Image: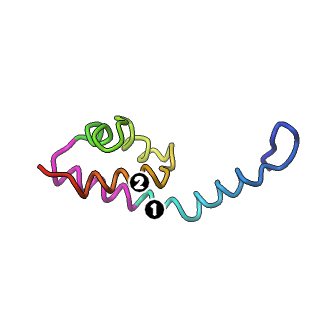
Amino acid sequence: MLFCKNGKIAIVRLIKIIVFLVFMNPTVKELLEDIDAFLKKHAMSASAFGVAAVNDSKLVFSLRKQNRCPTLRTVHSIKNFMNKYVT
């Protein structure tokens, strides 16, 4: 079980973990598929994409390693960048 410093069960943290494991993994996988297709289509590097989309050169690498779960704001910024990108 997860505990806070004061000994109470960290229910919120547990719920976030469950939501990530059950619902977010497929979403991250789909997002990565979209990003990879975009990178291939536009011959762009992963780090250049991250900087252009959300000013984070490690974005794609972190998503691939599943080190982070993107916020809705980040996903929106990524999708917005891909939709408005002009070569």
In the orientation shown, which residue stands out farthest toward the left? 87
Residue 86 locus on image (x, y percent): 14, 51
Residue 14 locus on image (x, y percent): 71, 54
Q: Which residue is depicted at the point 52% across and 60% down?
A: 24
Q: Can residue 42 be found in the magenta stretch?
A: yes
Q: Which residue is depicted at the point 39% across and 55% down?
A: 76
In the orientation shown, which residue stands out farthest toward the right? 7
Q: Can residue 10 be found in the magenta stretch?
A: no
Specify start and end residues of the magenta stretch as a single range: 30-44
Which quadrant would residue 11 be assigned to in this image? bottom right
Secondary element at image label 1? helix
Report which residue position mark 1 lands on.
27
Q: Callout 1: 10 Å neighbours few (<14), some, many (20+)?
A: some
Secondary element at image label 2? helix
Q: Which mark is residue 75?
A: 2
User: Is residue 64 shown above or below 37?
Assistant: above
How much space separates mark 1 and mark 2, taking CA atoms?
10 Å
On screen, residue 13 versus residue 38, left or right, reads: right
Q: Callout 2: 10 Å neighbours few (<14), some, many (20+)?
A: some
Q: Are marks 1 and 2 in contact (CB under 8 Å)?
A: yes
Dot 1 or dot 2: first in sequence order is 1
Q: How is the image coloured?
A: rainbow
Residue 73 locus on image (x, y percent): 45, 51
On screen, residue 10 versus residue 63, left or right, reads: right
Residue 59 locus on image (x, y percent): 39, 41
Q: Which residue is depicted at the point 43% across and 41% down?
A: 62
For the residue marked with disc 1, what is the amino acid?
Thr
| In-front residue for pair 24/51 | 51
Counting labels gives: 2
For the residue marked with disc 2, what is the amino acid?
Val
Magenta segment, prevailing SS (helix, strand or loop): helix
